[in-house]
Amino acid sequence: MDFTDLGFQYHKTHQNYLSRYRDGAWDQGILRDEDTITISAFSPAIHYGQQAFEGLKAYRTKDGHIQLFRPQDNAARLRESCKRLLMPEISDEKFLEACRQVVLANLDYVPPYGSNATLYLRPYVIGVGLNLGVRPAKEYLFGVICSPVGSYFKGGLSPVDFMVTEFDRAAPNGTGKAKVGGNYAASLYPNHMAHELGFADCIYLDPATHRNIDEVGSANFFGITKDGCFVTPKSSSILPSITKKSLMVLASQIGLCVKEEDVPIDGLDRFAEAGACGTAAVITPIRSITYQESKFVFPTGNEVGPTTRKLYDMLTKIQFGDLEGPEGWTTKIV
């Protein structure tokens, strides 16, 4: 396998993890070779979208160790998603042990240090079993699958163009803060339209007023103002990104002021740089945003902004073990 040219797509690995919830308790879980599951056609996951998932990565360090980045935060976010959809929660211990088992079972699929690739882990919880009415399932599956991946957006750390869509990703008081499949299903058509028009992805405005930036496709938005502030949207309908939380800490460490606030779509000229951030995307610099009939090009243009690059370097060096991060940010697997 050429780990230097992976892209963000599925590659078969050795084993994955699966645990079943019955009679009010999770079983111990097993590692299994097959990457398929068999469930009832009446399962609420199929008909009513009772399911949630997470995304995190395993990184190989220069000295050969393998570590996860802030997995406790992923475990906590999955619990919140489960609460929102009335599914049984996964404890930190069970979540971390499942991820550990999957990494150890697929060690030769953890890309080598220096390839800029990682082993992507996707924990998920789905409601299964015989259920016809709109109600929570009585049984659930918790699994962790994995695949080696490269950059989410083609080109890696290079500026891309986005367009603002007229569609909404989530309702003001809906499931936008939970990592559930319904939010992503709502984004498929706008994403397709953006690609058809030559854009990397689309930007969603807040669903209540359509005045402020909410999400940037499958990632969070941030901007670096001309007077040195790291600004990211404050909204009740966007996913609380672990990458964004980390960047807020790092931005503060390098002397930037950090703000979570409304980001009006008609006020982009205050930014010197902008980007999309998330586990899959890491940081993707934004070259331009097209809104209605106008196109705003950020001052950095085709270049990666100096602050964006510095934040990217700090974050990835911590993830790959080249820089010591705040306490508790990395968990060594082996």
Image: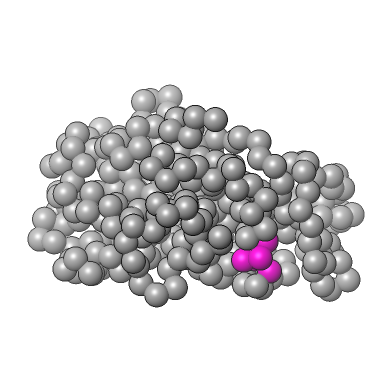
13 or 289: which is nearer to us?
13
Residue beneath the point at 72% across and 54% down: 17
The picture quadrant where one finds residue 328 is bottom left
Residue beneath the point at 78% across and 61% down: 29
229 or 3: which is nearer to us?
3
The location of residue 295, given as percent across then percent down, is 22, 35
Q: Is residue 127 visible?
A: no
The location of residue 194, given as percent across then percent down, is 41, 32
- Residue range corresponding to the magenta coloring: 94-98
Quadrant showing the N terminus: top right
96 or 211: which is nearer to us?
96
Q: Is residue 222 left or right of residue 195?
A: left
Position above or below: 214 against 24: above
Position above or below: 71 against 191: below
| Residue 153 within the segment the image draws in magenta | no
The location of residue 50, given as percent across then percent down, is 71, 56
Q: Residue furthest front?
A: 63
Q: Is residue 239 left or right of residue 97?
A: left
The picture quadrant where one finds residue 10 is top right
The location of residue 316, given as percent across then percent down, is 35, 53
Position above or below: 329 against 156: below
